[in-house]
Amino acid sequence: MKKSLFSLFALLLLGACSFVVNRNSEAIEIQELDYGIGKAELISTWKNEKSPTGKIRTTGEEFKIIKRTSEIPLAIGSQFGVNYVVRSSSLSQLNLTFRWTYPKTIVNNQGKKFSQVEFDLVKPTDAYTYSTYTIEEDYEMVEGEWTFSILKGKELIYERKFNLVKSATH
């Protein structure tokens, strides 16, 4: 009897250890610092056929928030986005998916349709970073709720909604 209780205890202990080891999946958190209308210096652009404009913008080290708001004026040149920190207890950088979802389908000048733009980037953890969108073309002038999402694999880890509205001068 003592031997079987000891065996049962040993199995439970081993099972608990295995459970702890298996539970050691990385906890990732997005700490939002600010959001709204802002400006970031354009450094370069790179080709991306998954984007309505056919390119993704690379910008400077800072996205300066001019106005904290989720209501964005719908105009060519409007730049809006989020300042944040990707928190991780053990990883120094993460491969993440960034997605902007439009309120309705966008049709670019080549007739190609887009309901969203999505791309992968490696982001540093525990350091300031940002993501923005800039309205560059008339076909991007889509009024309504735009959604910015960050995913780790297929898991949604952050979401921020912006309401793009025509101003009184339009």
Image (tube, rainbow, N blue to C red):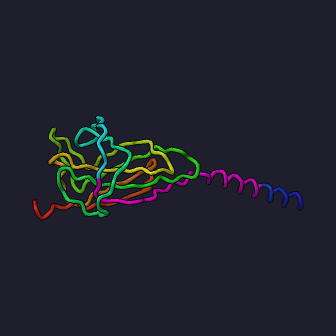
Residue 42: give x, y in percent of width and height: 29, 42
Residue 22: give x, y in percent of width and height: 63, 51
Q: Nearer the viewer, residue 40 or 36?
A: 40
Picture quarter with the C terminus: bottom left
Residue 80 position (above or below residue 52): below
Q: Is residue 76 left or right of residue 130?
A: left
Residue 167: give x, y in percent of width and height: 15, 62
List the single residue furthest toward the right.
2
Picture quarter with the N terminus: bottom right
Residue 70 position (above or below residue 153): below
Q: Is residue 16 shown in magenta?
A: yes
Q: Is residue 26 left or right of residue 139?
A: right
Q: Is residue 170 left or right of residue 39?
A: left
- Residue lying at 24% horizontally and 46% vertically, measured from the top left: 114
- Residue lying at 14% horizontally and 40% vertically, measured from the top left: 109
Residue 7 position by quadrant: bottom right
- Residue lying at 45% horizontally and 45% vertically, measured from the top left: 123
Residue 168: give x, y in percent of width and height: 12, 64
Residue 65 position by quadrant: bottom left
Magenta part of the protein: which range? Answer: 11-38
Q: Nearer the viewer, residue 130 or 109?
A: 130
Q: Is residue 154 left or right of residue 2?
A: left
